[in-house]
Amino acid sequence: MGAMPKTLMQSIVTQLKKERARLEDELHRVTAALTAFGKVYLDGKQPKRAPTARKKRTLSAAGRKRIVAAQKARWAKIRAGKKAPSKK
């Protein structure tokens, strides 16, 4: 086999150089994206969580008793209003 014609070899080299330039450009974009994301997480400015991901809160026994007592008082007030039939 003989050597390739010079124009074919030049065409291949030109295509490879274009591909290298394209890949370098793509690499710069990926690096920029990584830098941007890295800064967000290193600075502690993490994206906000969804509202459903809140910490579970606990209620003290005393707090629960106050709520129960207030609810019972509301129901007693409602029942007292229903027991007194209105006469005309």
Image (cartoon, grey):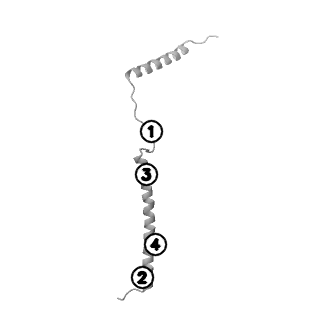
Q: In whole angstroms, how far apart are the C-alphas of marks 2 and 1? A: 62 Å
Q: Are marks 3 and 2 in contact (CB under 8 Å)?
A: no
Which mark is on residue 37? 3
Residue 67 to residue 31: above or below? above
Indicate the amino acid at tag 4.
Lys
Picture coordinates of residue 16, whole percent (x, y): 42, 74
Residue drawn at x 42%, y 50% is: 39
Q: Read off the residue under disc 1.
A: 52
Query: Which quadrant holds the N terminus?
Result: bottom left
Question: Between 56 and 16, which is closer to the camera in this rendering?
Answer: 16
Which secondary structure, mark 1? helix
Inter-mark Cα distance, 3 to 2: 42 Å
Label 2: element kind: helix
Dividing the picture into quadrants, the one containing residue 87 is top right
> Upstream in the sequence, badge 4 or badge 3?
4
Q: For mark 2, what is the residue?
A: 9
**Residue most extreme to the bottom:** 2
Q: Secondary structure at mark 4?
A: helix
* Alpha-carbon span between mark 2 and mark 4: 14 Å
Question: Does residue 20 lie above or below 58 as drawn?
Answer: below
**Residue 18 disc label:** 4
User: How many numbered callouts?
Assistant: 4
Looking at the image, is 19 positioned above or below residue 60? Answer: below
Percent coordinates x, y for residue 84 in the rendering: 56, 12
Give yes or no for contact between labels 4 and 3 (Cβ–Cβ under 8 Å). Answer: no
Q: CA distance from mark 4 to mark 3?
A: 29 Å
Amino acid at dot 3: Phe
Q: Residue at x 43, y 67 (%)?
A: 23
Disc number lying in front (1 or 4): 4
Nearer the observer: mark 2 or 1; the answer is 2
Distance from disc 3 to disc 1, alpha carbons, whole Å, reads: 24 Å
